[in-house]
Each structure stands twice: as structure tokens, then as C-alpha cells.
């Protein structure tokens, strides 16, 4: 999937939540573990362009969707839980400077 697709998907959700009066709360309390799983070095057009790092992370965090007006939790939980996100970092050149794009897929390690 292209970078445009991932960025567009994020914007679609953020705009939808904003229209519906919702806010996503993601509060990382502490990171317990970070482990690199994969590193791919590339020089696509510019030095380090399109290089990639995949990380396995264990973190205690809150992640939930709530109504902005009432504070009511719509999805997720205010409880602090252990999560294991996988992070994908990509180096992209924009306006002569590098941007690091991070995509995260999370799964909760604790039952509700």
C-alpha cells in the first residue's frame, strides 16, 4: 500500500471523528520494551530515501475513542493496559528535509 493511502486513511478517520464530535485518546504511560525486527537500507533518489525499520514495542497505555461533549467512552477503555504495537518507520524526502513516517498496528495483550 502506498504512503498516500496510509496518510489518506488517517485523515479520513480523523475528519469523520471530528464531524461526529469524537476524539481519539492515546496516552502512552511507559514503554517497557523496544526490539528492532527488520532494517532495510535503500537509496531511492536521495540518500537513505525509502529506508525502513520495523519495531516491536511493548507499552502500557490508554487508547479509546470518546465523545468530546460528554466524555463518554465510545470505543476502547480508559483502563491502562499492556499493548504490543508494531511500528514501521519510513524515511521520506520532502522539501529537502527527511520526514519519518510511522505506521502503527496495535493489539492489546490484556483481556478486558
Image (cartoon, rainbow, N blue to C red):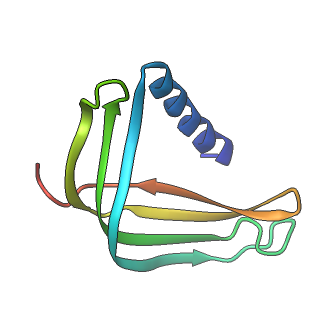
Question: Residue 87 location, x and y as percent?
Answer: 47, 63
Q: Residue at 64%, 63% (x, y): give it.
A: 90
User: Which of the pair 104/45 is nearer the observer?
Assistant: 104
Q: Residue at 20%, 61% (x, y): give it.
A: 109
User: Which of the pair 50/31 is nearer the observer?
Assistant: 31
The part of the image, by quadrant, that contains residue 83 is: bottom left
Q: Is residue 89 left or right of residue 68?
A: right
The single residue placed furthest to the left in the displayed view is 112
Q: Is residue 2 left or right of residue 54?
A: right
Is residue 9 positioned above or below 48 on the image?
above
Is residue 38 positioned above or below 90 on the image?
below
Q: Is residue 38 left or right of residue 46?
A: left
Question: Residue 74 location, x and y as percent?
Answer: 26, 30
Q: Residue at 58%, 65% (x, y): give it.
A: 89
| Numbered disc total | 0
Is residue 5 positioned above or below 81 on the image?
above
Is residue 81 positioned above or below 11 on the image?
below
The part of the image, by quadrant, that contains residue 25 is: top left
Question: Residue 46 location, x and y as percent?
Answer: 86, 69
The single residue placed furthest to the front in the displayed view is 69
Question: Residue 56 location, x and y as percent?
Answer: 39, 71
The part of the image, by quadrant, that contains residue 15 is: top right
User: Which of the pair 6/30 is nearer the observer?
Assistant: 30
Q: Residue at 46%, 56% (x, y): give it.
A: 104
The single residue placed furthest to the top in the displayed view is 20
Q: Is residue 22 left or right of residue 11?
A: left
Amino acid at each position: 500500500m502506498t504512503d498516500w493511502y496510509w496518510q489518506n486513511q488517517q485523515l479520513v478517520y480523523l475528519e469523520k471523528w471530528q464531524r461526529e464530535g469524537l476524539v481519539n485518546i492515546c496516552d502512552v504511560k511507559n514503554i517497557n520494551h523496544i526490539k528492532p525486527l527488520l532494517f532495510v537500507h535503500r537509496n531511492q533518489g536521495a540518500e537513505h530515501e525509502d529506508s525502513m525499520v520495523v519495531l516491536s514495542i511493548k507499552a502500557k497505555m490508554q487508547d479509546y475513542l470518546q465523545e468530546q461533549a460528554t466524555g463518554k467512552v465510545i470505543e476502547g477503555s480508559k483502563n491502562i493496559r499492556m499493548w504490543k504495537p508494531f511500528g514501521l518507520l519510513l524515511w521520506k524526502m520532502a522539501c529537502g528535509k527527511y520526514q519519518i513516517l510511522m505506521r502503527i498496528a496495535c493489539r492489546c495483550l490484556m483481556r478486558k
